[in-house]
Image (cartoon, rainbow, N blue to C red):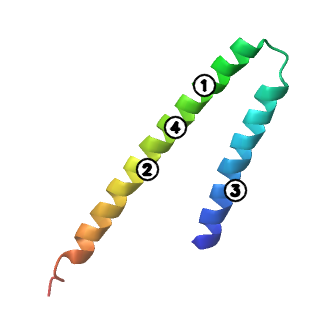
Amino acid sequence: MRRYALFALGAVLGSLVGSLVALLLAPSAGTELRGQINEKYIQISEDVRQATKQRRSELEDQLYKLRQPAAE
């Protein structure tokens, strides 16, 4: 499980760095480029918030089930 989590984290960070480099090397005006970076940052931030919220909900459900007394 830990290897998968580390791989996923590496893939996400790699894609973020790759996207940022691509934006920085793209031939566009500074103002336009800053706007693109800001939009991408907002989009990624929202995606991370949603994923965190979903995972937290899943973990809270699992915790609730684990706290329930075992049916005999």
Residue 71, x across and y down, in percent: 15, 82
Rendered image quadrant of residue 65: bottom left
Mark 3 / mark 1, whichever is N-terminal? 3
Disc on res. 45: 4
Quadrant containing the N terminus is bottom right
Question: Relative to residue 46, is residue 26 drawn left or right?
Answer: right
Which residue is at the far front?
A: 30
- Viewed as shown, does residue 50 lie left or right of 64? right
Q: Position of residue 16 (x, y in %)?
A: 69, 41
Mark 2 secondary-structure assignment? helix
Number of the label disc, if any, that sits on residue 38: 1
Q: Amino acid at mark 3?
A: Gly
The mark nearer the N terminus, 1 or 2, is 1
**Residue type marked 2:** Thr
First in residue order: circle 4 vs circle 3: 3
Quadrant (top left, top right, bottom left, bottom right) of the C terminus? bottom left
Image height check: is 30 above or below 37? above
Q: Nearer the viewer, mark 4 or mark 3?
A: 4
Q: Which residue is mark 3?
A: 10
